[in-house]
Each structure stands twice: as C-alpha cells, then as structure tokens.
C-alpha cells in the first residue's frame, strides 16, 4: 500500500482526498476516524494531526493534513501537467477555485448541511438554514455563469480544482431542499460523477 488516508467517508474533506486518490488510480488504505469512529482525540492521532480533524495522509514518514493540500499533493506527484497544471497561470487559476471552495463556497453552505443533516429536527435553527441557502444560491449562480464559459472549473480539461468543487456540489445536492435548475453545473457535475474518482465516494447519501 502506497499510503493511508485517515478519515470517515461521510466527511466532505475526506471525500476530496479519496476522490483524488481514486481518480489517479493509486493504491491506498482508508482508515475510519472522526465522528462516530472517534480516534481523532487520541495522542497517537494528534501526533499526526494537531488539529484533531480528518483527513490526514500518511505516506511512510511523510504526514500531510488539510484536504485541499492533500488533493494538490497527490495531483502534483502523480499527474504533473494534467490534473496539476505546469503552466503557472493555469495552475493558479485552478488554485484560485480550490481556495474559493475552501473559504467561500464551503462556509456558505455549511449551516444548511449541519442543521438539515446532522441536527435533530426539533433542535434545528431554520434561520441559519435560510441564511445559508440564500448566500449559497448567489455563489451557485456565480459558478453556473463560470461553467457556461468553461467545460471544467479551470478550463477545457479536468484539473485538481474540479475535485473539491464536485464534493461541495455533491453535499449541496444531497440536502432535502428545492434545487434551482442550473444546466451548466448539472452537466459538469454529471461528468464528474462518471469519473473513476467518484465511485463509493459521491455515490453515498449524506450523513
């Protein structure tokens, strides 16, 4: 086995790392950690990842955490010039969208996800859900406009940028809310779901 990914597959951040590894056809082992599995508060795990979160990649003596960074690393190591663009402007176009997922799109949708999927119905804060939906709809319109001019997130071919964005859209589409028709997002998302990386990752319901 080439490396290990610590983390439960119900985590969006673990899904990013596993999608990347599967897309690249790599030999790896995923170990359940976080959520109901615990593990992340143990001294052994904290020695690997002081943040006590998932995922963590362990490859021999090399340890890496931060989900989008793990995606970048795997793509840089195993897909130079393809998933990891070598041209600097192309690469940083991809980087930009990965950061947008992490800093803007993900945080915007988080409250709707938590309240509707992980909080029991009587305890839900629907004001948080409504605010989360309102802000995310604006971002989805932005992504729809972008994909109306680009086949993939960073241009004509798939790059590392598509992986975190696909995982985020998967989480959004899994919520029990009405979803506005956005044909360009839907066409791109269908392509990404058909990729090898999505198998047993984006085919699972949210929990």
Image (cartoon, rainbow, N blue to C red):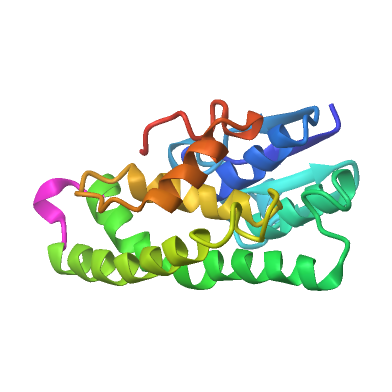
Question: Residue sitting at 49 percent across and 35 percent down?
Answer: 202
Question: Residue sitting at 23 percent across and 71 percent down?
Answer: 131
Question: Residue sitting at 82 percent across and 49 percent down?
Answer: 82
Above or below: residue 46 compared with residue 37: below
- Horizontal side of 10 relative to 155 (left or right) equals left
- Horizontal side of 62 relative to 202 (left or right) equals right
Residue 140: x percent and y percent?
38, 63
- Horizontal side of 61 relative to 199 (left or right) equals right
Quadrant housing residue 201: top right
- Horizontal side of 174 relative to 8 (left or right) equals left
Looking at this view, is 198 or 6 the one in front? 198
Extreme left residue here? 122
Quadrant in the picture for the C terminus: top left
Above or below: residue 168 compared with residue 102: above
Residue 149: x percent and y percent?
54, 62
Residue 40: x percent and y percent?
58, 48
Residue 43 lies in the magenta stretch: no
Looking at this view, is 113 or 8 the one in front? 113
Q: How many numbered callouts?
A: 0
Residue 26: x percent and y percent?
80, 31
Quadrant in the picture for the N terminus: top right
Extreme front residue here? 149
User: Is residue 32 visible in this depiction of the protein?
Assistant: yes
Looking at this view, is 143 or 164 the one in front? 143
Q: Which residues are magenta?
A: 119-125
User: Is residue 8 visible in this depiction of the protein?
Assistant: no
Question: Residue sitting at 25 percent across and 64 percent down?
Answer: 133
């Amino acid at each position: 086995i080439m490396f290990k990914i610590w983390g439960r597959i119900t985590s969006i951040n673990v899904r990013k790392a596993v999608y990347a590894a599967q897309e690249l056809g790599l030999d790896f082992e995923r170990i359940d950690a976080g959520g109901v599995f615990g593990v992340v508060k143990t001294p052994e795990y904290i020695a690997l990842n002081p943040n006590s979160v998932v995922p963590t990649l362990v490859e021999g003596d090399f340890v890496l955490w931060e989900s989008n960074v793990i995606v970048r690393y795997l793509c840089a190591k195993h897909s130079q010039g393809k998933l990891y663009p070598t041209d600097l402007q192309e690469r940083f176009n991809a980087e930009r969208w990965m950061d947008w997922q992490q800093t803007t799109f993900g945080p915007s949708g988080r409250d709707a996800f938590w309240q509707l999927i992980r909080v029991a119905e009587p305890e839900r804060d629907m004001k948080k859900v409504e605010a989360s939906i309102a802000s995310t709809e604006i971002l989805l319109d932005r992504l729809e406009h972008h994909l109306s001019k680009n086949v993939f997130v960073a241009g004509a071919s798939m790059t590392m940028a598509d992986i975190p964005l696909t995982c985020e859209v998967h989480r959004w589409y899994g919520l029990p809310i009405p979803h506005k028709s956005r044909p360009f997002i839907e066409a791109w998302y269908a392509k990404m779901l058909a990729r090898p990386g999505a198998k047993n990752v984006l085919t699972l319901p949210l929990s």
